[in-house]
Amino acid sequence: MLLGTVIMVLMVQNYLLVRRNEENEKIVGALVDEVNLHSAMQIGDSLGAFTALTSDSTFVRVVPNLHKKRTLLFVFTTRCPTCRRIMETWNQLFADLAGSGVDIIGLSPDHVRSINLFQTDVFMSFRAFSLALDSTFFTKHKLRSVPQTVLVDTSGVVLGVWVGLLSDADRAEIQKVVNKSRSPPLSN
């Protein structure tokens, strides 16, 4: 009887600790999102061509507006728990926007090997490039926080920036802008 009571008390304590952790995670997540908003790329910023590494370590010149298409950038790191959680949303956006005339690419400061391991662990339906050899890219373009979803127009100008997890409203807004021929700048 005493053992049963002890087990019950431990179960209740465990439940309360898990609940408290979930609440704390939400609070910390909100604070991180607030900080990220101030360290993100801004609407109107320009994104030019850059050199990156492909999954097989080949150098490639990435030109966001090469084909006069809009470009949707998914900026992540392989060590970011929020980046893991957003992958399903990004994969869904990739599927939803297929054939819409938008280029969709992932960018990470991590080495190719880390990205490849990450891709085997977390499914990614879009191409991902490593910027590990260009340490200035993330600083120059204010990509200090991840995940970021960045929409770039056909001339390389940033139309929208979303920091952190994407809500259903964010996804709808991205799809709406991508499907328009011309659009005003967006904000998060």
Image (spheres, rainbow, N blue to C red):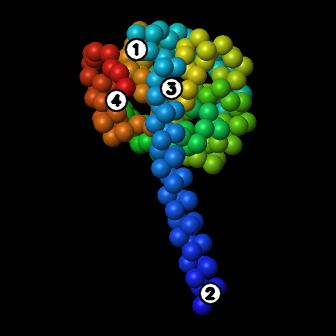
Q: Provide residue 59's location: percent of width, then percent of height.
A: 68, 20
Asked if the residue under mark 2 is in contact with the one under mark 3, i.e. CB atoms within 8 Å, the reply is no
* Alpha carbon separation for disc pair 2 and 4: 58 Å
Element class at badge 4: helix
Q: What's the mark number on residue 151?
A: none
From the image, state whether disc 4 or disc 1 is nearer to you: 1
Name the N-terminal-most of marks 2 and 4: 2
Q: Nearer the viewer, mark 2 or mark 4?
A: 2
Q: Disc 1 marks which residue?
A: 43
Q: Which residue corresponds to mark 4? A: 174
Left or right? Give the position of 140 relative to 148: right
Q: Earlier in the sequence, mark 2 or mark 1?
A: 2
Ranked by sequence position, the earlier of labels 3 and 2 is: 2
Amino acid under label 4? Ile
Identity of the residue furthest to the front in this view: 2
Q: In front: 146, or 91?
A: 146
**Residue in the image at 61% along x and 15% along y:** 139
User: Horizontal and vertical percent for residue 77?
Assistant: 62, 33
Camera-nearest label, 2 or 1:
2
Q: Which residue is mark 2?
A: 2
Image point 65% across, 22% down: which residue?
131
Residue drawn at (65%, 26%) of the image: 109
